[in-house]
Amino acid sequence: MKNHPLNPTVLLLLFVALNFSACAVMDKNTPSWAQYRIPDQANELQLASNSIGTGDPVLLIHGFGASSYSWRHIVEPLAHKYRIITIDLKGFGESPKPRDDAYSVYEQARLVRNFILENNLKDLHIVGHSYGGGVALATSIYLSTSHPNLQKSLVLIDSIAYPQDLPDFVKVLATPILGPLVIYALPNTFQVKNLLKKVYFNDALIPQDAIEHYANDLSKPNAKYAVLASVQQMLPKDLQQFSDNYINLTIPSLIIWSREDEIVPLAIGKRLHENLPNSKLVIMSGVGHAVQEEKPRLVLPHLQQFLDTQSH
């Protein structure tokens, strides 16, 4: 575990936050998977997206607190052979941030599934990171039951998938009164920098432009509302029951994990590998929770080889 010095004022606020983080509250009113299983085709909300290249479509789904910017290092290399599509999930990046209570993984997956159908994406590869990996899993289960021939493969990078202990910063944000106090009182750049210190294994590799980009995203209207709403619905109450679907997801799957991940432990990745019947697990060392940002050269060969194998 890494230690990072904080100035005294911020340290005091975080000390209070961590001592009250046991009061974190997950939203008990989040609809269960059973309430989302019947597909609907209407997308009242349009997700922001970008597309580059030609070939089989590869849809990249970012993690919590991030945006399509998190894929910036791998988009161009992959676009030499594939049509690379990046999306911003609801509440993040350039996508709409309505002040509603529909920010669960299942809701995000519904919007992504509808995006796929509306854009007539076929021979599709889906890549999800962290929170976006949970969205990718739910989206893939949607497609496997309603449109089983659309998706060719799935890639999960340090993905949420099962009930787990939440990292301290998530517990703080999910704590009533305290969460809003922290997210609105602390400077955006400070919040982003300290989050990235949990995400990166080597803090020296955190680029200043990434701090500024994510801090700017956090300053957009309703962005902090969306963060708080998302964090309260991050792990659905029926997640363990939902995970029973994984065994039926038979498309080729690549699972990529960091041995040093401080946010989603390697045990989750190993359990996923056991439960996804057609999966391969790649474990990396010396990198943190977001290998595509910290050390993209480590992950690119695995992505390229896997996609090439599934596309022929």
Image (spheres, rainbow, N blue to C red):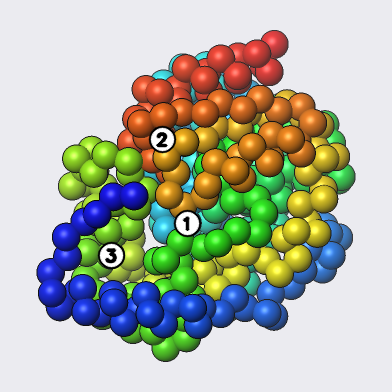
Residue 75, percent from left and from top: 43, 30
Residue at mark 3 to residue at mark 2: CA–CA distance:
20 Å
Residue count near mark 2 (Cα–Cα under 10 Å), binned few <14, some 14–19, many ≥20: many
Residue 105, relative to residue 84: is it above or below? below
Residue 288, percent from left and from top: 39, 40
| Disc 1 to disc 2: CB gap under 8 Å | no
Residue 104, relative to residue 201: is it above or below? below
Q: Secondary structure at mark 3?
A: helix
Decide which of tag 1 and tag 2 comes sooner along the chain.
1
| Disc 3 to disc 2: CB gap under 8 Å | no
Decide which of tag 3 and tag 2 comes sooner along the chain.
3
Residue at 15% x, 78% y is: 9
Residue at 61% x, 28% y is: 281
Q: Is residue 159 visible from the viewing direction of this image?
A: yes
Read off the residue under disc 3.
191
Instruction: Return the mark for residue 64.
Output: 1
Residue extending furthest bottom?
A: 177
Q: Amino acid at mark 1?
A: Phe
Q: Amino acid at mark 3?
A: Gln
Decide which of tag 3 and tag 1 comes sooner along the chain.
1
| Disc 3 to disc 1: CB gap under 8 Å | no
Instruction: Return the mark for residue 223.
Output: none
Residue extending furthest left?
A: 7
Residue at 85% x, 39% y is: 248
Residue at mark 1 to residue at mark 2: CA–CA distance:
15 Å
Q: Secondary structure at mark 1?
A: loop
Residue at 79% x, 31% y is: 277
Read off the residue under disc 2.
291
